[in-house]
Image: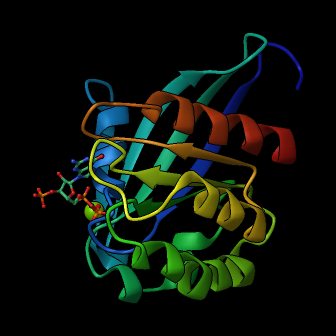
Amino acid sequence: MSENKKYSLKVIIIGEPAVGKTSLVKKFVSGQFSKDYRSSIGTNIFTKQIDLKKDSKASIQLWDIAGQERWVKMRHVYYRGAKGVIIVGDLTRKNTFDQIEEFWIPDIKQYCSKAPIILLANKNDLKKELNEKDISLLSERINSTSVLLTSAKTGENVEKAFKLISEHAVEIFR
Ligand code: G3D
Ligand code: MG
């Protein structure tokens, strides 16, 4: 990465309904965001400026599905140009992790296969249906660059997750 650069990154957040995607985005951008609702594609877009390593900065554009996860209109538009992908599972519902492999990864392979992926195991403040071993095995199978246990409620690892995916995106697409 060269120094003093300003990057502009589209990052998408995906996963089953109610895993905490919107809560994670809101926790991260709270206080400092601009929001743009694109009803034509069923998406909320939040923008936030962040500092990266070596005095570089990034403007990250976070795309969050506004309901109807599996039927987001014009899927290709949602995925197009994504420089990073955040995939979220809910630790209290094992099925949400099974669906990552069965439903979401094939979509990524089809629409934005070069984008780095970070796996978030969210709701770490609640009683879990999966252990860390299951999650790290899934992370290996889907080839995610990082995996983190998060909580949108307590804020655990939220800032770190968005920073990491931005760093990975810059490494690959700079
Ligand atoms: P989605 O955008 O993936 O559909 P939401 O998910 O962000 O709308 O979250 C779904 C529900 O889970 C919300 O509860 C939200 O408060 C809760 N939630 C999200 N993340 C966490 C977390 O880390 N811990 C806990 N305890 N709850 C979380 P409601 O009741 O508003 O539907
Ligand atoms: Mg949502």
Q: Position of residue 87 (x, y in %)?
A: 53, 61
Count of marks overlaid on the render: 0
Q: Is residue 154 above or below residue 41?
A: above
Task: Specify the farthest residue to the right.
Answer: 2
Q: Is residue 87 left or right of residue 67?
A: right
Point 51% across, 52% down: residue? 120
Q: Is residue 50 above or below residue 68?
A: above
Q: Is residue 119 left or right of residue 127?
A: right
Point 29% across, 41% down: residue? 125
What is the quadrant of residue 100 in the picture? bottom right
Frontmost residue, 99 versus 33: 99
Q: Is residue 123 above or below residue 42?
A: above
What is the quadrant of residue 17 in the picture? bottom left
Q: Is residue 35 left or right of residue 157?
A: left
Let me know if residue 72 appears in the view. no
Q: Position of residue 29 (x, y in %)?
A: 35, 33
Q: Is residue 140 left or right of residue 96?
A: right
- Which quarter of the rendered picture does the N terminus lie within? top right
Q: Position of residue 11 (x, y in %)?
A: 57, 52
In this picture the colour scheme is rainbow
Point 24% across, 38% down: residue? 153
Let me know if residue 70 appears in the view. yes
Q: Quadrant of ligand 1?
A: bottom left
